[in-house]
Image (cartoon, rainbow, N blue to C red):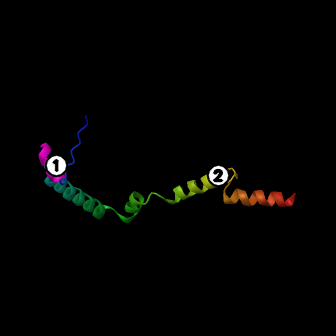
Amino acid sequence: MKVTFNIDCTPEEARRFMGLPDVTPLQDKMMEELEKKMQENIRSLDPETFIKTWMPMTMESWGEMQKMFWAQMGLGGMQNDSTDSEVSKKSKK
């Protein structure tokens, strides 16, 4: 025999019924502390450090991405300077 109970209640009512603690005040306090620390860190950062921290796509990363695209296109990771010299060599033949 199979018996099914459907209980319609809010999450707060279910938590109380099961005897779980109310952690809402703790979560609110932790979020306030986290917000304060983030604001302190943002105020203390100089613009260059802020950009490096929040925007990881620096010029080096763009160069690495370009190399990856060249490799995927079958050009073997050629860079612009070497590509120009290769093209001029091929055109002379």
- Res 41 quadrant in image: bottom left
Outermost residue toward the top in this view: 1
Question: Which of labels 1 and 2 is toward the front?
Answer: 1
Instruction: Please tell me which residue is depicted at 19% across the width and 49% down the height of the picture.
Output: 7
- Using the numbered discs, state the Cα–Cα distance from disc 1 to disc 2 in whole angstroms: 54 Å
Outermost residue toward the front in this view: 1
Quick check: 86 left or right of 80?
right
Q: Amino acid at mark 1?
A: Ala
Comes first in the chain, label 1 or label 2? 1
Instruction: Please tell me which residue is depicted at 20% across the width and 56% down the height of the picture.
Output: 33
Q: Secondary structure at mark 1?
A: helix
Instruction: Please tell me which residue is depicted at 13% across the width and 54% down the height of the picture.
Output: 25
x, y percent for residue 54: 39, 60
The foreground one among 14 and 70 is: 14
x, y percent for residue 60: 53, 56
Crowding near the residue tagged with mark 1, few <14, some 14–19, many ≥20 C-alpha atoms within 10 Å: few
Q: Secondary structure at mark 2?
A: helix
Instruction: Please tell me which residue is depicted at 60% across the width and 52% down the height of the picture.
Output: 68
Q: Quadrant of the C terminus?
A: bottom right
Q: Amino acid at mark 2?
A: Gln
Question: Which residue does the numbered mark 2 point to in the structure image?
Answer: 72
The part of the chain drawn in magenta is 11-21
Query: Vertical placement of 51 versus 21: above or below?
Result: below
Question: Which residue does the numbered mark 1 point to in the structure image?
Answer: 14
Quick check: 49 left or right of 66?
left
Q: Which mark is residue 32?
A: none
